Amino acid sequence: MANHPQQLALPPPRTYSRTEFAALRARVQGVPVAKIARLYFDSDTTTYIDEPEQLERFLRTMRDDLVQLAILHGSAVLADHLRASIAKHGSARLASASLQMVEQASRLAVAEPLAGHAVGLWFRPLIARHLAGEGIHTLAELVAVANRRGGSWWRSVPRIGPGRARVIVAWLRRHVDSLGVTVAADVDAAAPLVAPGDIVVIGPASGQLAPLERMALPHALSGEHGTNRAPVFPYVRARHDLDAVRAYLAGYAGQTATQRAYVRELERLVLWATTQRGVALSSLTVEDCEAYKAFLAAPAAAFTGPPVSRTSGRWRPFAPGGLSADSQRYAVRAIRAAFDWLVDVRYLAGNPWRAVKDPRAVRRAQKMKIDRALPIDLWTRVRVFLSDRTGSSGPQGARWRAARALLLLMGDSGLRIAEAAAIRRPALEWLPADGEVPPTWLLQVIGKGDRERFVPLSDECIAALHAHWRDRGLDFNAPDVDAPLIAPLVIPGTKRARRKFGLDDGKEDVAGVPLQEGYSVRGARGLTSWAIRQMLEHLTDLNESERRQLAHTSPHALRHTFGTQSVAADVPLDVVQRIMGHASLQTTTTYVTAERRRMRAEVSKYHSRLTGSGQK
């Protein structure tokens, strides 16, 4: 047995990532190890930053591995040179040129990216941290996000602009064979599939969908000769249906939320009528209206898609999953009201929606989902966590300070997210102490139904706003500053974004420039969702119930948190009603949950007695 030749099983060669190759190049060029650790490696995944001597050992091992591969696979001249260097110095001494030859000869050591690889293995730590902040931890998740959001996938990721996004997408496409997942063909960081100014002709033959502002209709479906057009003199100058719809929507100028909701319902109806039914809006019959009511319950797949920019070719009028019963009911009522107006201005002869019943909706005993309100102990822990995170420096610290200010506006003051995003500095006033009344910051809010109300802000919320304004380079106490209370610090480099935020094309830094626009409602929701994801990841001592509660927390749940905790603190109901802007006191009484808790406690005692009796 001992005389038989033994087969040696050699381990496969060590593989190295692109980041590690870049680190070795920097070391060969004389860059200090401590600086290499800061530039190329993340403190969350390695200990190199705190222990640079460990990185020094790793780079020496990597160099020796690559040299051995180069001796085996490189040219005879390179192999002789490396052997001579080893014989003279004990290990190969490499210059930049010789390292490049070693890398080329040892290309077998380069790891192929796989779908399950962490983004930190292939992208620099700064980029990897920002991707992880958006919930993108692996290359597969990065591809999925790009495919879901389309060409604007990068807009929500700080420090990734169109140029860097284009490089990332190109790299993902080059490695499609090893990744096993493909970036969609229309994911292009350079521009959306449809340019913002392009007009799209909608109809059965085109198969295209576009929002109202970029919509055009073929003559046969324009409604210029609709069968329901009024025969008498019209009160509006509307040649066709789109003119009439836009005239109706113009009446809601200044009521942003209401106008946006009506645009959504009417553009959905126009798209369905022209592409699915092949009929003009001004030719709809009761049968057509009933068919659309059924369509609302189950929109066609071609009409649904994830939220994207309205300038994107991927825009769709419905979100995946269709509409809830309440949303279907709202849609029918909004359309009926619009058609009533078209009849009143004598554009239409009659309103077919008058003969259509509202979709049946579930009658809820409790319409507001106040059970999603955070309990006082969990809300307190969230506030402490937010305060701790805002002390960090860099872009993440600034983002946390913005998130803290937004969450406290909703959770400490009961603002709706649209109100918190729209509030500007002139609406906030400081009132000095008045007898027993302490000094107070009072916020003027114009809420639903254009109702004005005044909301006191907590000292903690004011401190959070101060910190957020310092990040923006603005003086919170300066007179006559007309800027939004909360605004993004990272602005995409597109002309459209710069116009929106009131920046000149030549300016690269927003520091010291009062932004003309704050967060959109979608942007504010995104900031809230990001903060909640981070809390779920880092608040490791939450029990399962608390984790589920926090995971289901929405911006509106924070408003309910204020209402619930205010009532629990014995704030009079009429005061809570005025602060929250409820039209009816009955709505505010929903927060009174004492009887509900008492009922549960008493019934549980009864059930316990039954269980005890059965065991005897």
Image (cartoon, grey):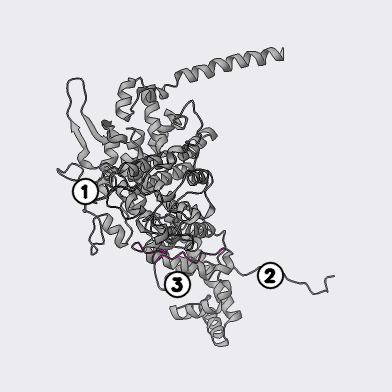
Amino acid type assigned to the residue bearing label 1 in the image? Leu
Tell me if label 1 and label 2 are in contact, CB under 8 Å.
Answer: no
Q: In the visual, does 157 lie left or right of 178? A: left
Q: Which residue is mark 3?
A: 25
Image height check: is 135 above or below 614? below
The residue at the point 52 percent across, 36 percent down is 548
Residue 90 inside the magenta-drawn segment: no
- The residue nearer to you, when weighing 321 against 40, is 321
* Spot occupied by residue 63 in the image (x, y as percentages of width and height): 52, 72
Instruction: Identify the main secondary structure in magenta.
Output: loop
- Nearest-to-viewer mark from 1 and 3: 1
Mark drawn on residue 10: 2
Total numbered badges shown on the rendered structure: 3
Amino acid type assigned to the residue bearing label 2 in the image? Leu
* Residue range (magenta): 181-196
Q: Which residue is mark 1?
A: 474
The residue at the point 42 percent across, 24 percent down is 590
* Spot occupied by residue 277 in the image (x, y as percentages of width and height): 49, 53
Earlier residue among tags 3 and 2:
2
Quadrant the N terminus occupies? bottom right
State the SS at label 3. Answer: helix
- Quarter of the image for residue 422 reads top left
Q: In the visual, does 419 lie left or right of 371? A: left
Image height check: is 468 above or below 316? above
* Spot occupied by residue 565 in the image (x, y as percentages of width and height): 39, 26
